[in-house]
Amino acid sequence: MRRFLLLFVLVWCALHSEARNQVRVLLRVQPETKQFWCRYTLILPAEAASPQVLLNLNRQYRVLSVQSPRAKQRIERYLYPVFQDTMQGINLRYAPQDRRAKEVTVTYEGTLTAKFATDQVLELSGHTNWMPLLPYKEYEIVDYTLDVQTPEAYSVISTSLPTKQHTGFYRFQGTTCAIELTALVAKQFHRLASSSALPSVVVYKAGGPLLKMDSLLLSESERIIGFYNQSIGRQDAIKRFSILLPNTDRDAFAMLDNATVITYPDFDVRELEYRTTLAHEISHKWWGYGAFSDYNDWLNEAFATYSSFLYLRSVGDTASYRQLLNAKIKSATGAPAVIGFDKSKYNYATYRRVIYDKGSVVLAFLHNRVGDEKFFAILSATAAQKTATTDAFLDIVAQEVGEETRHWLKAELTR
């Protein structure tokens, strides 16, 4: 009887657990011409069934085919407000009563621009906008398989090690945000690894050669991760971390799959700006679950910003901590409220003032109100629970320090 009940519970849990979207990608690249061909398959579980599926694809790419059983399809361009750009909308309609799982395969081809392709590397990443994505769900968690085919002379690096590889073929598998599937393709990657087993930090640099500032980058990353693992990430510590250096000279950004991409060729952590950028991006391992398309994005960007300030404070650089925080306070003065902020109605500068600056200031005020011990308890619980909404964060605050502080914090966020 006990065995029967246990089996029943296990089956019930399996059937009722939240199913994630599945993504399968076959990517063929031609680095010499900077061209690629892609077959992208999205599988939507029955629980997420809808009579309509819309996918956004970069308007620069040519759609070769769209396949989905039982669907009528239409492709038309439209202005997507989140990206503030025109996208190809791949619209699929099913019978209203069709609640079965759905599989959509889009085959397309394109050429990477100079921002993402050089003579040394092709960068297909979260900032390349190279895959079809569900609108407003770009940062939704998916399970994925990414197969990359290259000419024999080339190698591929991603956010994790390949699960299968042979000459001209690499397979990567894992779980991450839909937009963050990553492949760097180059003839040569230089590798620099930490000497400690945990956390294991590896730097991959396209082209070369490795420089002193790359070694400093590795050492600083180890220190940052060490601090975070003992503070915000103590319930969900980093065990491995990859730093990808494509040298495409554009920006720096993080991914949930324990990795960051730094494209600047002169990234020197001895400079305060770069040191805080690195700490900001590494912390996105925990701060990346808020919706990018609405005000909950402050759970990503303000938390990462203030985490970088906390790192400076932890190594004794209190002067820089105060300097950067005072700059945020000045910027946030008179800015719209965080809760309810609609980024589509404001310019990018105002978005930064609210989501990055004002959010960081509110966290600093909360820190000052509750003290170190309780503040880090709040952050570690927020990180461990992969908190995605402001209401959920307010609930954690109430659990850790009481309803009075919850009400105070909500007032600050709506001020």
Image (tube, rainbow, N blue to C red):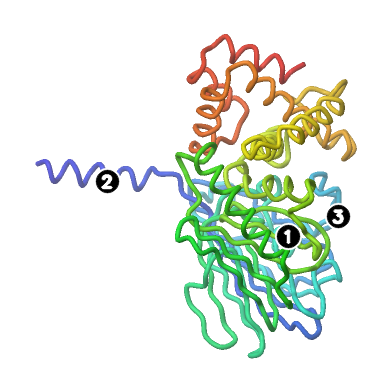
- The first of marks 2 and 3 along the sequence is 2
Give the image quarter of residue 126. Answer: bottom right
Task: Look at 64% across and 73% down and name the residue there.
Answer: 39
Residue 406 can be seen in this image: yes
- Under mark 1, the amino acid is Ile
Task: Look at 34% across and 48% down and name the residue there.
Answer: 14
- Under mark 3, the amino acid is Thr
Q: Residues within 10 Å of mark 3 (few under 14, many from 20)?
A: some
Residue 321, above or below 6 = above
- Under mark 2, the amino acid is Leu
Q: In the rendering, at what x and y percent does residue 243 appear? A: 64, 61
Which quadrant of the figure contains the N terminus?
top left
Task: Look at 85% across and 70% down and name the residue there.
Answer: 113
- The first of marks 1 and 2 along the sequence is 2
State the CA–CA distance, disc 1 to disc 3: 27 Å
Q: Which residue is mark 2?
A: 10
Which quadrant of the figure contains the C terminus?
top right
Q: Which residue is mark 3?
A: 86
Residue contact at pointers 1 and 3, CB within 8 angstroms? no
- The first of marks 1 and 3 along the sequence is 3
Task: Look at 56% across and 58% down and name the residue there.
Answer: 241
Q: Secondary structure at mark 1?
A: strand
Q: Which residue is mark 1?
A: 262
Which residue is more in the foreground, 151 or 221? Answer: 221
